[in-house]
Image (tube, helix red, strand yellow):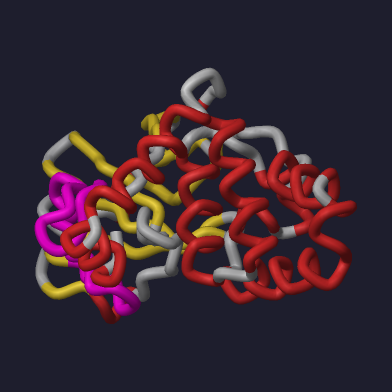
């Protein structure tokens, strides 16, 4: 929540808190994905970039696909108009989210080979590119953890230069992650997105 909203809640709780209660009650019969898609549409309608980025990320995190989000925007065309849809698309392009790349819109999840297991030293963090994604890989003996390089906050791509020891800091809002566990240790409250993986025929494979 922004500093401005926190101030208004403190200054005029009797006016502001019922509004938030109304919003919560209004959506209690909707599933999470539907609520998220409606929130995305309202932020596009108001052309609130920060809110659009926030709720777009939340919708993806809660299981909405890129195609569902695009369809929701086009279904809202009578209200939004084409100009606002183009406005939202420009932000999408700036965010460069892999799920929205044209080649990935209808892609079926599958296993991707990252490389031979022997290329990953125990106790070290590796940075790899595969299938249009950047990954951080941590190996501890025979155990692996594979993370998306995208911050779970607003899907900002966290570059390799942001890694300091085992700490990874998002350059946009300074969320700090411990790569050995994936946990967010400062500023934010959500862990890195971890991919399912397996070792097969001496290769590290990741599923998305």
The image quadrant that residue 108 belongs to is top right
Q: Which percent across, then down, holds residue 167?
A: 13, 66
Confirm whether the magenta stretch covers residue 63. no
Residue 164 placement, left or right of 81: left
Residue 18 placement, left or right of 156: left
The image quadrant that residue 80 belongs to is bottom right
Q: Is residue 176 above or below residue 207?
A: below
Look at 43% across and 50% down and name the residue there.
Answer: 115
Look at 30% across and 46% down and name the residue there.
Answer: 17
- Give the position of the N terminus as an image quadrant: bottom left
34 vs 90, nearest the viewer:
34
Q: Which percent across, then down, holds residue 171?
A: 30, 78
Look at 34% across and 50% down and name the residue there.
Answer: 147
100 vs 144, nearest the viewer:
100
Q: Which percent across, then down, holds residue 124?
A: 16, 59
Residue range (magenta): 168-191
182 vs 116, nearest the viewer:
182
Q: How many marks?
A: 0
Q: Is residue 111 above or below residue 40?
A: above
Residue 68 placement, left or right of 185: right
Q: Is residue 176 above or below residue 70?
A: below
- Give the position of the C terminus as an image quadrant: top right
């Amino acid at each position: 929540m922004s500093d401005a909203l926190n101030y208004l809640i403190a200054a005029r709780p009797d006016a502001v808190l019922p509004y938030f209660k109304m919003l919560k009650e209004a959506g209690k019969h909707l599933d999470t994905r539907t609520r998220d898609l409606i929130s995305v549409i309202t932020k596009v309608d108001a052309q609130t970039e920060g809110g659009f980025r926030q709720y777009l990320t939340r919708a993806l995190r809660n299981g909405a696909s890129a195609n569902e989000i695009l369809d929701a925007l086009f279904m809202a065309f009578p209200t939004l108009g084409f100009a606002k849809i183009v406005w939202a698309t420009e932000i999408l392009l700036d965010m460069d989210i892999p799920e929205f790349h044209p080649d990935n819109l209808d892609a079926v999840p599958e296993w991707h080979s990252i490389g031979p297991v022997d290329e990953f030293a125990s106790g070290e963090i590796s940075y790899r590119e595969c299938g249009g994604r950047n990954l951080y890989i941590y190996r501890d003996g025979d155990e692996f953890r594979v993370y998306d390089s995208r911050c779970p906050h607003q899907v900002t791509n966290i570059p390799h230069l942001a890694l300091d020891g085992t700490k990874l800091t998002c350059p946009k809002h300074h969320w700090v992650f411990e790569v050995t566990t994936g946990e967010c240790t400062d500023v934010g409250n959500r862990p890195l997105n971890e991919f399912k993986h397996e070792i097969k025929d001496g290769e590290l494979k990741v599923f998305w």
